[in-house]
Amino acid sequence: MFYREAGQFKTTYQGDQAVFPVFQDKIAVILVILAAYAVPLFADEYWLQAIFIQFLVFALMAIGLNILMGYAGQVSLGTGAFAAVGAYACYKLTTNIEGMNVIVAILLSGGCAAAVGVVFGLPSLRIKGFYLAVATLAAQFFILWLFNKVGWFYNNNPSGTITAPPRELFGVLITGPSASPEARYIVCLTFLIVFAWFAKNLVRGRIGRNWMAIRDMDIAAEIIGIRPLQTKLLAFAISSFYCGVAGALMIFCWLGSAETEAFDLATVSFRVLFMIIIGGLGSIGGSIMGAAFIILVPIFLTNFPPMIGLDISTALQKHLEEIIFGVMIVFFLIVEPEGFARLWQILREKLRKWPFPY
Amino acid sequence: MKFRKLVLATAATVVGLGTFAAAETAKADEQFFPMLVYRTGAYAPSGIPVANGFRDYYTLLNKRDGGINGVTVTFEECETQYKTNLGVECYEKLKGNGPTGASLFNPYSTGITYQLIPKASVDKIPILSMGYGRTSAADGRVFEWVFNPPATYWSQASAVIKYFARRAGGYDKLAGKKIVHLHHNSAYGKEANPTLEVLAKRYGYKLTLVPVDHPGQEQASQWRQIRRIKPDFIFMSGWGVMNQVAIKEAAGIRYPMDQFVGNWWSGSDADVVPAGDGAKGYLSTTFHGAGTDFGVHADIIKHIYGGDAAAAKENKVGEVLYNRGVVNAMFATEAVRTAQAKFGKKSLTGEQVRWGLENLNITQETLDKLGFKGMVSPLKITCEDHETMGPVIIQKWDGAKWSYASEWLTPMRDIVRPIVEADAAAYAKENNITPRTCK
Amino acid sequence: MEFLESILVTPFIEIWESPYYFTELVLVGLSTGVLYSLVALGFVLIFKASGMFNFAQGAMVLFAALTLVGLMEHGVPLWAALILTVAVMVALAFLVERLMLRHLVNQEGLILFMATIGLNFILEGTGQLMWGSDVKRLEIGIPDQPFDILGGKILLNTFDVTAAVIGALLVVSLAVFFQKTPMGRALRAVADDHQAALSVGIPLKTIWIAVWTIAGIVALVAGIVWGAKSGVQFSLSLIALKALPVLILGGFTSVPGAIVGGLIIGVGEKVAEGFWGPALGGAIENWFAYMLALAFLVFRPQGLFGEKIIERV
């Protein structure tokens, strides 16, 4: 009923190749975006600062990793390191260059992350699959060690941490402690929408097709004339760019201050990996849904017992939360190994025929 | 058996607290204390006793004194697992609780402290990072909202060097001595390095910095390095499993335990117990007593555990980190008491509690009255000095309990304070803060 | 230039000048390496038999050690606690097969990997829920005395030696089990080709339970050895991370690879930390192990002993 596509004809190629060819999809996406921008009107500081901004940052990172893993088929566990490169680069750029626009700094730091990503992407030419995954851990450990060790990266301050300085955009503070959560939220949301849109178009085009060809069988792809070197490294570069931007946002808009520990394997790399697997490999929307799942479920599980008036000790609650979360992951993988993206697809198919399935 | 008892005890506490909270909500005047705890995860062995200490002291105040001057103490735990991202969530969740919001935050994690420092002045909630966190927060002119009494890592390092000098037989004997700083390779672990380097220049000892990566389960090569250096003293800034392994490894290379001094996060019961007899004689710094021989413990056992010393022991009463939690809770509640003298005996806001912290003056009489006689030194915070450079003492593990092994050592103010002020000034410049003037 | 000299020249001179220190590091590295091999073996067994990259191996180490020490704290004697813990690990293997593996047949490697991360959460949560998150002392009577050789020039520890011997015994018996027993042959058959193994009548489910049980026992031994050193606590589950470079170095599918890889990584990281660490600022062990493995991989992408990857279009 909602998804009646009958009567929607395309008369131009452009119309046929639009990102959302179906009218209802277009409306839905516009509504979701509008709703997302309206969130600050309703949400309180806890939700904005602790949950939504975190979600936006991780969604961006998940899109980045999904480009690399879902589309180009290169398994990586170095997400945390690439995010750290972005964060530290952004810190250096904003604190050392007078009058640097913070948005420009964030984009430039994405560029730094991309450069580092390319370097650590080089082994992917020879190493594949899980071997590559574990090899990217070398990046993870080495980069964090370096940032921790070399004082230059954190301006030699004795605390060894980086802190986001207050910076304005159009006269509104968007980073630093005094920036309102609403402003930070809007900045992160805009970044996510623009980058998701860009990614969506990227993977539909020639580059995306090359990536998928490499993913499905790199030898065959090479034979039909796709250059594996450029294609794989480009995937690493763009993926790291996304991760770097997300890392910069992580410090500047979400955490405010951090040491390298904030980017470690368990807190970042693995979590982002969960997101894209739960969300669906090779799907931009799936990355966002996966991020929502991984961020929101533990928070829900923490807040649920007090909500229904159950007063259990914090430790017990945390352990139960871990167990339930683990069970959910396993259960979900058994039920739908291809993730939310696939579930959504099934639902959409059902909606097209509803209420008269033939 | 033990497990069942533990479950029963937990259930009883939970039910007790539950009914307690339910009964007290009717009252208007209450003071809310948020608790960022880590009872699970890699650092749980250190987090559990601290959290228990806080909880027991707050409960004790309610049961024994009916709160702080009649204002009920309420508190809520939030699990951080020592992770920064969960710390932010907990902070945002708890900061608005209670009738007047959170009184103050005790982050109990370097990472979380650094994150909360910039937020504190915006949200107008003070941070009490007792003996950890940002050292330069000792300069109250720049860091109005952050308090780190009684001593920072830098002060601690200077006191340890003082101790080494006494052991060596005078400062002049330090020249040429070899000292190793074995540290956790993180912002926290590296904290003491600059001070130790400055002092090395002054006294001429040879300093070697040996970092250990998180988590520190493997330290074989570090200890072989130490065996090769043959240091006269080792100072350790460890955390979590690193402490236990280091003590075990030190015994493994026959390093004399009485030349091995941990900082105050490397000297709790959980750190020495796994090493068994090998840990006998191990030293660590502290700024408060360990054990249950103090007045406050008698009260805690009587009011909270119903006189059952065994149950109290199960809950870690008297362990070093438990006592640290108790002392920290006492500082926090005394700050509220101080503020009440000015603002009235009602629920106070974070801003008012901050005033209380800045004018906190815990005299020997107060300590005696509260049952902390011989456990902590008196403390007087001022507008300029949020640290107070309280005295530090060395404690020794004899295989069963900790006892004092030195006299109280005052940190070297002339060395530490200038570095503190320089760093605070740099921070102020970077973040456009105009330091206030303290009259 | 000076920096390059300090990492390219000086360490070698030092190795030449301090042979005893070097030997000591190598010996310590070997004894640690055996333990890395042990954890890596747990991975290899499961990977061979079910194509599953079992991330929960670390959590299994924690879970097994916690169960053992938890039982002992309740007054169960060591031998009984050991038997009970093994029984628990068997039950775990059974549950994993029943509730997880069976439903995930024919899934991609990545999905299986993800499922084991879920299992990792479940085990960590359950272990701590049952036995608490406190550090527990594990005293099982492994002698722990330093002793001198070569007139005090080299110092070793009976604990390390015993641990290495236990590890080596277990590794050897596993290798024999694989090569000589009917069960081992069945396991290898399954590893080679699931369908062919099924068609000659090898019960896949039994094999899976067997493999997970063995992995559980390997985890228990690793947990005992490490737990005796640092106390049983959460960080035991992080040991899995130390085994990963061993795996890529040795190859995911090779038992000898896990053994040799463990020794290379063990010795490599200790020597690197000892001689290159000071010049680079220390604490280089973690990334060094990965870099070393990566360097090997560039020359042999399937690991030292891994099966050669043959690709067809």
Image (spheres, rainbow, N blue to C red):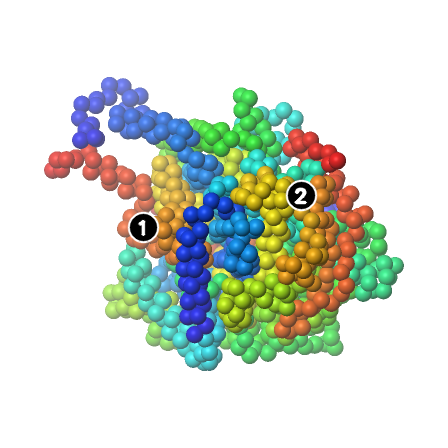
Alpha carbon distance from label 2 to label 1 = 53 Å
Amino acid at circle 2: Glu
Q: Quadrant of the N terminus of chain A?
A: top left
Residue at image x 64%, y 33%?
B431
Q: Position of residue A305 (x, y in %)?
A: 37, 52
Number of numbered discs present? 2
Amino acid at circle 1: Phe
Q: Chain of mark 2?
A: B
Q: Which residue is mark 2?
A: B358
- Viewer-side residue, B180 vs B152: B152
Residue at image x 45%, y 79%?
C76
Q: Chain of mark 1?
A: A
The answer to which image quadrant residue C85 occupies is bottom left
* Callout 1 secondary element: helix
Quick check: B83 left or right of C310? right
Compared to residue C35, the image places residue B412 above or below, namely: above
Q: Which residue is mark 1?
A: A332
Residue at image x 24%, y 19%?
A11
Quick check: A244 left or right of C24? left
* Callout 2 secondary element: helix
